[in-house]
Amino acid sequence: MAKAVLVDLTRCIGCRGCQVSCKQWNERKGLKTSFHGDFTSPVKLNADTYTRIRFVEAESKSKPVWSFVKEQCFHCQNPACVSACPVGALQKSAEGAVCYDFDKCVGCRYCMLACPFGIPKYEWDKAQNPWVQKCGFCAERIAEGSLPACVKTCPTSTMLFDERDKVLAEAERRMKASPGKYVNHIYGKEEAGGTSWMYISAVPFEQLGFRMNVPCEELPKYTWDVLQHVPLKAAGIAAVLGGIAYLRNRGANEEKRS
Ligand code: SF4
Ligand code: SF4
Ligand code: SF4
C-alpha cells in the first residue's frame, strides 16, 4: 500500500533536525550559506539539499506568528516528472516514492520543467556527469520497514508516516477535533491530482508561500495530450536518448568502480 506523510505545521518548531538528518542519510555535502532577510537557510532547495525549513513571518487572527514550512518533493500520486521523462529515469514505486535512476538519466531536464512545485534540481556546478537531485522519500528505508530519516528525527512528531488513506483520515480528525485551529484545507489532498506529502496548517497556505495555482487534475494528462500527437517521434527520441544515457553513464560507473 502506498505510503504518505502528513505534515502538521502547527507542531513544527523550526529546529531543522529533519534537514540535518536528510543530509546525513543521503550523504549530501554541507554548503556554506548566509541569511537573506529571514532565518531560512539555504535560500532555495538545491542539488545537495533535498529538504529545508522555510521560516515565514505571517499573520494569524490579526497576530504575527512564526511559521516553519518543511519543503521536499511531494511524491505526487501521478507525477508529472515521471510522465515527462523520455527514458524512464523517474519512476513511482508501489510504496509511493518517486525515485530517480541515474543510470537512465540523459540530463534533458524535462522533469524540472514538468514539476508543478519546482522540486528537481540539477548539479550545475559539476563539469562531469551532472545528475538531477531530489528527495527520494528514503525509499530504501521504507522498503526495510523504517521511517524516512526526516520523520524519524523530528522531536515534535510534526510528520506522520502511514498509508495515504490513514494519513488523510488523521488530518480530517485533527481538524474536526480542534475547530478553528486549522485552516479548512489539506494541501496535497487534491493539488496535482493528489500527493503523498500533505499539509495542515493554522495559517492560510497562500501566506506560507505554497503554490496556489497548481491544478487539481492529474498533470500527466497534459503531457500525454501533447505526446500522443507525436508517438513515433517520441519513441525515436526515447531510443536515441537511451543510447546517450548508456554512453554518458558508462563513464560514471567506471569512475565509481575504479
Ligand atoms: S513534486 Fe515534482 S518532482 Fe516530486 S513527484 Fe511531484 S512532479 Fe515529481
Ligand atoms: S524522506 Fe528522506 S530524502 Fe526525503 S526529505 Fe525526508 S530524509 Fe530527505
Ligand atoms: S525536525 Fe520536526 S520540528 Fe524540527 S524543523 Fe523538522 S519538521 Fe520541524
Image (tube, grey):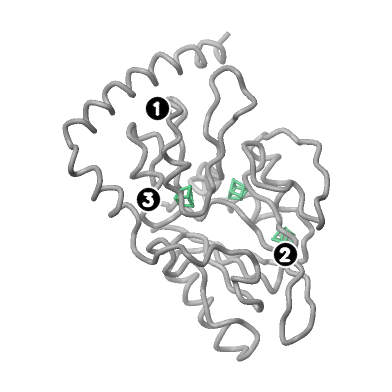
Mark 1 is surrounded, within 10 Å at the Cα level, by few (under 14), some (14 to 19) or many (20 or more) other residues, namely many
- The front one of 110 and 151 is 110
The yes-or-no answer for disc 2 within 8 Å of ligand 3 is yes
Secondary structure state at the residue bearing disc 2: strand
| Amino acid at dot 3 | Ala
Secondary structure state at the residue bearing disc 1: loop
Position of residue 187 measured from the top left corner of the image (x, y, whole percent): 52, 69
- The front one of 139 and 50 is 50
Instruction: Using residue 105 as the reference point, say whether residue 220 is left or right of it.
Output: left
Q: Nearer the viewer, mark 3 or mark 1?
A: 1
- Are discs 3 and 1 less than 8 Å apart at CB? no
| Mark number, residue 68 | 2
Q: Nearer the viewer, mark 3 or mark 2?
A: 2
> What residue is disc 1 on?
104
Spatial separation of the CA atoms under disc 2 and disc 1: 36 Å
Give the image quarter of residue 165.
Answer: bottom left
The earlier-in-sequence mark between 3 and 1 is 3
Residue at x 43% of width, y 55% of height = 76
State the quadrant of the N terminus: bottom left
The earlier-in-sequence mark between 3 and 2 is 2
| Mark number, residue 94 | 3
Spatial separation of the CA atoms under disc 3 and disc 1: 20 Å
| Amino acid at dot 2 | Phe
Residue at x 72% of width, y 82% of height = 60
Q: Is residue 31 above or below residue 41?
A: above
| Mark number, residue 250 | none
Instruction: Using residue 61 as the reference point, say whether residue 89 is left or right of it.
Output: left
The earlier-in-sequence mark between 2 and 1 is 2
Q: Is residue 250 above or below residue 26?
A: above
Residue at x 66% of width, y 40% of height = 25
Secondary structure state at the residue bearing disc 3: loop
The yes-or-no answer for disc 3 within 8 Å of ligand 1 is no
